[in-house]
Amino acid sequence: MLILITGGCGFIGSAVIRHLIKNTEHSVINIDALTYSASPESVAEIADNHRYSFFQVDILDLNSLKKIFNEYKPDAVMHLAAESHVDRSIDGPEIFIKANIDGTYCLLQAAYEYWKKLSDNKQKSFRFHHISTDEVFGALQLGDPPFTEETPYDPRSPYSASKAASDHLVRAWFHTYGLPTFVTNTTNNYGIWHFPEKLIPLMIINALEGKSLPVYGKGENIRDWLYVEDHAEALVKAVEKGVPGETYAIGGQQPRTNLQVVKIICQILDELKPDPKGKYERLIHYVTDRPGHDFRYEINSAHAQAELNWKAKHTFEEGIRKTVQWYLDHQEWWKNIRQQRYAGQRLGTK
């Protein structure tokens, strides 16, 4: 199968590509606009593989998308390209509307025009897999059951609202035009090659640099964490087995408060790279909560586990230790980002 992947130089997209090239016989076309958070280094280890091709293309460029579809004739699409940082969506929502809504429309339209010309058998086997987030479901309180595929949408931030809109577009192209689309929604991912603005890499790097570890509010907000390589495996199984019109909620079922996450990072660093000035927890600093900060996310992934024959392999403790070690071993990569693209500030506190 030839799979067209959008955003393949991003955090989750690159994990999917590495998994596909290393563990399957599928071929990959990676299209990525190479925005600020893209890291071509994350796919460098497989970049010379004959089953991998890369094109620097923005998903808003409809003509370029059509050309790639017509020339390379993919069997499936995995749509991961998105603006995804909630804090940035608070500071500047316009780019989220363009990338996540308009970009998804362009990709759907290019895929649909290509799909219409395929033979009956090719049309039936084609898949458009849209990768989304659990944030479209809103927020949970303590005691509320986790999100499922049936949870009503209730987005609270410009980011989650833009992703909700893209989900609705994907389903509309299935119901209206027959394009064989399906959606996966996932919880918070973490792991290697994660751009340093997100919570876990930001805390690891700030700690290593002896800087403050800024925690919103009291650190009581809860997220369900999923190691990115486990998610990549689930997404590949989904594109292989996914049923058009379906939704698959994919989670690690390992909820932790933000403060618990930061403290375990500090404890691992105390062990792996002790700071002569003292325990890393001394750097924790509570800051004003961001606007519209959802209290809790958690997914019940029983349906996805059963239908896709998948389950997360890493416990949070195993995954976070691997992640911390990776950032210790790859300091050149994130130091370059700190110097050129992102200095480590927390955003979205307007």
Image (spheres, rainbow, N blue to C red):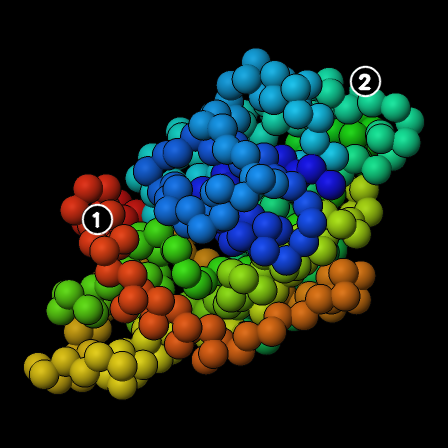
Residue found 34% across the figure and 71% down from its top: 324
Judge by depth and name the residue closer to the eye, 286 or 335.
Answer: 335
Left or right, 58 with reference to 233: left
Left or right, 286 with reference to 226: left
The amino acid type, in three-letter code, at marker 1 is: Asn
Judge by depth and name the residue closer to the eye, 21 or 270.
Answer: 21
The amino acid type, in three-letter code, at marker 2 is: Lys
Residue that badge 1 annotates: 336
Left or right, 141 with reference to 236: left
Judge by depth and name the residue closer to the eye, 105 or 150.
Answer: 105
Residue 100, relative to residue 199: is it above or below? above
For label 1, the crowd category at 10 Å Cα-Cα, with few meaning under 14, some 14 to 19 and many 20 or more, is few
Quadrant in the picture for residue 128: top right
Q: Where residue 125 sits: x, y (%)?
A: 84, 37
Residue that badge 2 annotates: 117
Query: Which quarter of the figure is the C terminus placed in?
Result: top left
Quadrant in the picture for residue 267: bottom left
Secondary structure at numbered mark 2:
loop
Q: Where residue 236 sits: x, y (%)?
A: 67, 53
Q: Where residue 213 sits: x, y (%)?
A: 22, 67
Residue found 54% across the figure and 43% down from its top: 49
Judge by depth and name the residue closer to the eye, 324 or 20.
Answer: 20
Residue 269, relative to residue 31: is it above or below? below
View extreme (right): residue: 120
View extreme (left): residue: 277
Q: Is residue 181 visible?
A: no
**What's the CA distance linking mark 2 and mark 1?**
45 Å
Residue found 77% across the figure and 24% down from its top: 115
Query: Which quarter of the figure is the N terminus placed in?
Result: top right
